[in-house]
């Protein structure tokens, strides 16, 4: 029997992706996994309003918690001390663009990227993490926000994560996972994965979640046959199944509209091809390459993202932090209690090493020809130190949430190189030029893949909606 181990998870609307992959033997090849693959491709032939695509795939590095734009990407050396903070600006490889001294390696890769220094939005009510994350992942502002800014747990009625929509509209051409999220779903308090699933598209389009630390040994059991089930044995079962179906003309006629044989083939190929297993195997990389990315969870996740893109995965999302509700002085970008120490000693060295390595590596390998790279958080941090902007308590050197102005990084797929798009005011508090709403960035990602962000879709109530609320930013492109 084919055995795909893992933790079972059920919900009121059916089985999860892991359970579909868990289904065993002939039963799996006869129904569950093929049907799952068929569901993924269902509707792909419908009109998607495609533009000419610039990219084939996407890597998103998501920095949960809200990194301080002033202390990382957009220094303000002429501002008062309670705004400019402790870090000094440094020059980059591009004349006229400076970043914080916390990012010396990224400074040498500035000629390959665009810094979006005018990300901005005005939230409804208190701006807490969950609502901001939902908006960034789905392209839609949540319609139910509590006074604290928190949202209810994930629901089948949620708008889908953009990676799930992309998986549906641009189905895979070969045996590879379309959307991978690692090393765990995003979490705020007790709300796990809000805005990070397929929502009303159905669980067949949920991301494949690794649930492992790539800086440790990665177990590939989910994509591995049990030792007693050889590839030849599974081939025999597959051949037998095709023969049975071929001899049952009425059954074949009844299911012909669903092209089930195609999905038997895909299920079979996914498990047996070895392509997915090989992509997850970081031992195939040299120690020099792994060291360049950094022997950290985030660094090795970024390297794994590159390998998955090379293997054909459509959308890869790497989340930081890797441990939800960790010590804010050690793991989170949510720097209320302390800002400068964690940034200097932990966050920025890890981010600087991993991000600069990924940019350099993807550029040298030619992956930027058709891969879009995005690095961003859900918002920035307050320009003024020690003040409360979201109802939280902040230390004298802490910074609170700030959605009104922050910075993101975008590169590849024809994005302008060595550019600062937009700019913030003298204190980093609001855009002085070319504001970009988070939903505009989501719309830009869709557009880059040739998907019309203004196309009409049906929500869970079969009501027509735009794919995303935002508008693509044409100024990012060369």
Image (cartoon, rainbow, N blue to C red):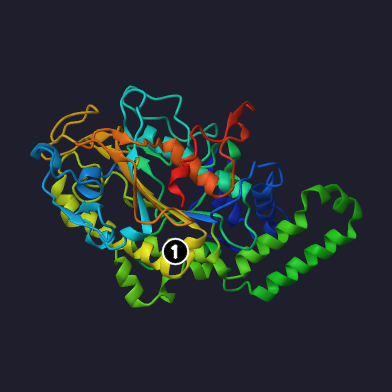
Q: Nearer the viewer, residue 35 or 416?
A: 416
Q: Is residue 329 visible?
A: yes
Q: Nearer the viewer, residue 151 or 225?
A: 151
| Place of residue 452 in the rendered image (x, y in percent of width and height, measured from the top left) | 59, 41
| Place of residue 397 in the rendered image (x, y in percent of width and height, measured from the top left) | 11, 40
**In the current view of this chain or complex, which residue is farthest to the front?**
95
| Place of residue 11 in the rendered image (x, y in percent of width and height, measured from the top left) | 54, 39
- Name the residue located 71 percent from the left edge and 53 percent from the top edge: 31
Q: Secondary structure at mark 1?
A: helix
- Name the residue located 43 percent from the left edge and 24 percent from the top edge: 144
- Name the residue located 71 percent from the left edge and 42 percent from the top edge: 46
Q: Is residue 26 visible?
A: no
- Name the residue located 36 percent from the left edge and 24 percent from the top edge: 124
Q: Is residue 288 shown left or right of residue 170?
A: left
On screen, residue 256 above or below 471: below
What residue did someone put label 1 on? 306
Q: Is residue 411 shown left or right of residue 243?
A: left
| Place of residue 38 in the rendered image (x, y in percent of width and height, measured from the top left) | 69, 50
On screen, residue 160 above or below 465: below
Q: To which quarter of the image does residue 262 belong?
A: bottom right
């Amino acid at each position: 029997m084919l055995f795909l181990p893992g933790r079972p998870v059920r919900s009121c609307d059916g089985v999860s992706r892991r359970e579909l992959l868990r289904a065993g033997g002939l039963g799996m090849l006869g129904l569950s996994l093929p049907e799952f693959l068929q569901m993924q491709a269902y509707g792909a032939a419908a009109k998607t309003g495609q533009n000419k695509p610039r990219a084939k795939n996407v890597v998103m590095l998501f920095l949960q918690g809200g990194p301080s734009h002033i202390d990382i990407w957009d220094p303000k050396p002429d501002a008062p001390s309670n705004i400019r903070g402790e870090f000094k600006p440094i020059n980059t490889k591009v004349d006229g663009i400076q970043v914080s001294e916390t990012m010396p390696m990224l400074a040498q890769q500035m000629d390959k990227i665009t810094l979006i220094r005018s990300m901005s939005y005005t939230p409804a009510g208190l701006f807490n993490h969950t609502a901001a994350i939902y908006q960034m992942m789905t392209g839609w502002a949540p319609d139910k926000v509590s006074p604290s800014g928190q949202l209810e747990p994930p629901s089948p009625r949620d708008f889908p994560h953009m990676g799930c929509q992309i998986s549906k509209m641009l189905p895979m051409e070969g045996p590879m996972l379309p959307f991978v999220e690692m090393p765990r779903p995003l979490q705020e308090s007790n709300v796990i994965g809000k805005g990070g699933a397929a929502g009303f598209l159905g669980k067949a389009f949920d991301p494949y979640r690794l649930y492992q630390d790539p800086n440790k040994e990665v177990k590939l059991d989910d994509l591995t046959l049990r030792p007693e089930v050889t590839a030849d044995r599974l081939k025999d079962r597959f051949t037998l199944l095709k023969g049975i179906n071929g001899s049952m003309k009425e059954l074949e006629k009844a299911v012909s509209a669903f092209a089930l044989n195609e999905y038997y083939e895909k299920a079979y190929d996914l498990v047996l091809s070895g392509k997915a297993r090989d992509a997850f195997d970081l031992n195939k990389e040299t120690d020099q390459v792994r060291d360049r990315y950094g022997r950290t969870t985030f660094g090795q996740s970024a390297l794994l993202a590159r390998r998955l893109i090379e293997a054909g995965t459509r959308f890869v999302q790497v989340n930081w932090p890797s441990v939800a509700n960790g010590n804010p002085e050690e793991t989170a970008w949510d720097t209320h209690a302390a800002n400068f120490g964690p940034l200097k000693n932990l966050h920025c060295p890890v981010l600087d090493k991993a991000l600069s390595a990924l940019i350099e590596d993807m550029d040298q390998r030619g992956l930027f020809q058709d891969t879009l790279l995005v690095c961003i958080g859900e918002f920035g941090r307050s320009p003024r130190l020690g003040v409360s902007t979201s109802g939280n308590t902040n230390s004298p050197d802490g910074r609170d949430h700030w959605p009104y102005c922050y910075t993101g990084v975008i590169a590849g797929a024809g994005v302008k190189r060595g550019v600062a798009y937009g700019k913030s005011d003298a204190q980093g508090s609001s855009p002085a030029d070319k504001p970009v709403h988070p939903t505009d960035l989501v719309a830009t990602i869709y557009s880059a893949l040739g998907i019309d962000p203004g196309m009409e879709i049906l929500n869970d109530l079969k009501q027509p909606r735009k794919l995303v609320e935002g508008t693509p930013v044409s100024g990012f492109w060369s």
